[in-house]
Image: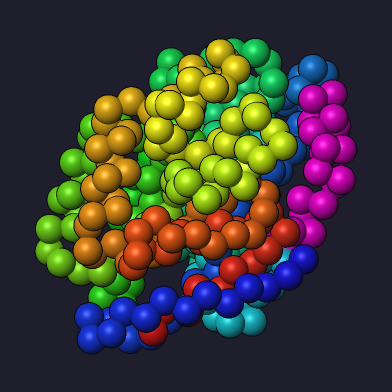
């Protein structure tokens, strides 16, 4: 476990400096008798995938936030799959901590990880209402103000944005307040794509990858990750909107920094990291 410190300087629009603790990709993987034997077995296997370290990672983020008296922002995959035990544990996390914002990841709506079902709107909607009822804010789009800054979380866990999300983002940006944007999946940059596919031609797991690159993906990954017109329009808007001052993501289980434009940084946080965002 480690702590990274990232300073975002906003200048005179900032009413008061504050810190946030960015956590992501906890992958809680609990199952009990309420979920049935199949889910219990699934939970055991998924816990082993992550070395049984999920509670340690969550506790580290919580301790960091309490030491700094800073709210937590979580960018998805808090739960690894849908189970009553996972949802109860997620709710306890929200009840016991100051969580400023949480977004959905690609696992929040998984019935079973690796079940072969296509991750699309129909699949998500099978569990969306149930999952949402345990989370403190809208996990598909949420905006709040803190210290004169807008914190906005958008669900891009299935590698696409939707038209209503773009419209909401434009509405939130209209008043000119600086924005910190929180996503689960990182946005494509050439350098990031190259680093993620070097020696591994499968795919890069990024949002907004150009068609000439996704055409090289295996058919299932191309179908999963190919950007549609609305997604490309949203990515262009994010990159061109002067109010958006930094983008924070997860998903890749590593720490990285990349520039979406000459002035817009994107920070990727690992599941083993508590990133302290120092807003100044």
Most foreground residue, 151 or 125:
151
- Residue 201 % position (x, y): 65, 29
Give the residue at x 66% y 40%.
Answer: 198
Q: Residue furthest left?
A: 175
- Residue 214 % position (x, y): 48, 26
- Residue 60 % position (x, y): 72, 67
- Which part of the image, by quadrant, shows the C terminus? bottom left
Most foreground residue, 213 or 155:
213
- Which part of the image, by quadrant, shows the N terminus? bottom right
Give the main secondary structure, helix, strand or loop, of the magenta stretch.
Answer: helix
Most foreground residue, 173 or 108:
173
Splitting the image into 4 quarters, where does residue 145 fall?
bottom left
Give the residue at x 76% y 23%.
Answer: 39
Left or right: residue 276 compared with residue 175:
right
Give the residue at x 29% y 53%.
Answer: 239
Left or right: residue 187 compared with residue 272:
left
**How many labels, in total?**
0
Q: Can residue 119 be seen here?
A: no
Left or right: residue 88 compared with residue 154:
right
Q: Can residue 8 be seen here?
A: yes
Left or right: residue 25 compared with residue 1:
left
In reply to whether residue 88 is colored magenta, the answer given is no
Looking at the image, residue 82 lies above or below residue 165: above
In reply to whether residue 47 is colored magenta, the answer given is yes
The region drawn magenta spans 41-59
Splitting the image into 4 quarters, where does residue 203 fall?
top right
Looking at the image, residue 182 lies above or below residue 214: below
């Amino acid at each position: 476990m480690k702590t990274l410190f990232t300073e975002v300087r906003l200048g005179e629009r900032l009413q008061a400096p504050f810190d946030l603790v960015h956590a992501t990709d906890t992958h809680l993987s609990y199952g009990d008798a309420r979920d049935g034997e199949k889910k219990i077995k699934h939970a055991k296997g998924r816990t082993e995938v992550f070395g049984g370290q999920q509670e340690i990672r969550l506790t580290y983020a919580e301790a960091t936030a309490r030491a700094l008296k800073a709210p937590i922002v979580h960018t998805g995959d808090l739960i690894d799959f849908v189970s009553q035990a996972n949802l109860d544990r997620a709710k306890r996390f929200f009840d016991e901590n100051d969580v400023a914002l949480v977004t959905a990841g690609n696992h929040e709506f998984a019935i079973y990880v690796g079940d072969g079902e296509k991750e699309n709107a129909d699949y998500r909607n099978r569990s969306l209402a149930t999952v949402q009822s345990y989370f403190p804010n809208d996990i598909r789009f949420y905006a709040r103000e803190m210290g004169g800054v807008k914190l906005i979380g958008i669900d891009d866990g299935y590698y696409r944005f939707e038209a209503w999300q773009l419209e909401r983002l434009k509405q939130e940006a209209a008043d000119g307040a600086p924005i910190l944007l929180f996503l689960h999946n990182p946005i494509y940059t050439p350098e990031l794509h190259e680093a993620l596919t070097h020696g591994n031609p499968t795919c890069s797991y990024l949002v907004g990858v150009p068609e000439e690159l996704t055409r090289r993906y295996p058919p299932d990954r191309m179908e999963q990750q190919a950007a549609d017109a609305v997604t490309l329009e949203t990515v262009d808007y994010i990159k061109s909107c002067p109010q958006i001052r930094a983008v924070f993501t997860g998903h890749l289980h590593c720490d990285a920094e990349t520039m979406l434009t000459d002035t817009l940084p994107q920070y990727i946080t690992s599941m083993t990291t508590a990133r302290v965002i120092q807003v100044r």
